[in-house]
Image: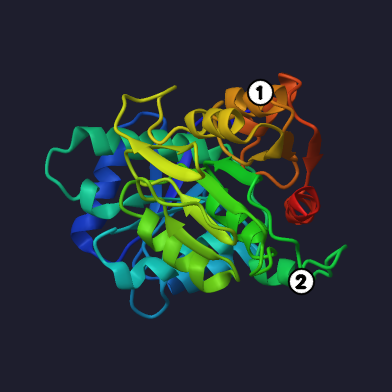
Amino acid sequence: MEPEIKGMVRVLVVEDSPLMCKILTNMMNSDPHILVVAVANNGKEAVELVPRLKPDIITMDMDMPVMDGFEATKQIMAYHPTPILIVSSSVFRLGMEKVFKAISHGALDVIDKSELELVGNKKSGEALIAKIKFLTGVKVTDQSIGKWRNERPIIDLTSPLKKVSNKIVAMVASTGGPQALLKILQRLPEDFPCGIVIVQHITNGFLTGLVDWLNKECKIRVKIGEDLEEIRPGVAYIAPDNFHMQVKEGGKISLSNEPLHGGHKPSGDVLLESVAKIYGKGSVGAILTGMGRDGALGMKAIKQSQGKTIAQNEKSCVVFGMPNVAIEMNVIDQVLSLERIAEEIVFMVS
């Protein structure tokens, strides 16, 4: 199930740079189905404009005077939930944490501002317009991580677990994935008994910021996977930008620069199929929120190898595309909320 839009898309641009405001406005108004209804020069103005204008989507800068993009996102999502696309530069590492904190409070995705600033970059303009149209169709609610943290776990995830080496957990996610990964990985204990391998589709340049953010928030270690690296218990390895990641004999990571697979590099299918081949019935696969169908064939491979398969349920997904494809293929053992996925993973590998 993919989001759909009807009629004109009304956009609120939140940006303190006059040049960037002009670039964004010109790019979006070049499409006959998009209209920039207003520009806010800081987060405070945005918070005040949203209830009056009721935009279909907001593009949100992070670094602004008076009120930054994170605080504005937090307030908008709490009182007037609206799809938010973060427009930030991947060059400035110090601002990365704000980006992912905003995502943890309900912002949907991030796009690289520095790419948009390149004069005549038609490809980036088209990507922005496509992203705006897609995210406008996403139904949003206040999904603050702070609220979720206060929930009481159904089972004790802090109890000691037996170390194993013949099992692995593999996950694939796209739109809404950073928040979903945080909710799952945050609930795993430091002595989690096997390795975790992940494909997360994200705008190039933001992966390091995502990994740094997850590392700070989780008990387990989170890192970018490296070629020939040994997969260790209690460590989550995320596929690097522009490389396919697989597992190989001996419990090691293999990176390759092969062509796009199903339109993706890294590809969730490529990772999951390698997991099925090497780990067989010791495989635990989870397909999470995201558009498209990446990961569905990989889940089928895990199911056929007698491994365990989990799909995120529609209610907790930002986009129910990827999990829905796998469910319709009848290759999923359990369809669970994010809050239950971590618990089931712990059960499956213990």
Horizontally, residue 206 falls left or right of residue 340, namely: left
Question: Label 1 belongs to which residue?
Answer: 300
Q: Nearer the viewer, residue 165 or 23?
A: 165
Q: Is residue 299 visible?
A: yes
- In the picture, which quadrant includes the C terminus? bottom right
Residue drawn at point x = 59 percent, y = 22 percent? 297
Single out the residue that lies furthest toward the right. 154
Horizontally, residue 47 falls left or right of residue 241, namely: right
Tell me if mark 2 has few (under 14), some (14-19) or many (20+) residues whose alpha carbon lies within 10 angstroms of its own. few
Q: Is residue 63 visible?
A: no
Single out the residue that lies furthest toward the front. 250
- In the picture, which quadrant includes the N terminus? top right
Position in image of residue 349 (x %, y %)? 74, 50
Tell me if mark 1 has few (under 14), some (14-19) or many (20+) residues whose alpha carbon lies within 10 angstroms of its own. many
- The kind of secondary structure element at disc 2 is loop
- Say what amino acid the circle numbered 2 marks: Thr
Question: Label 2 belongs to which residue?
Answer: 158
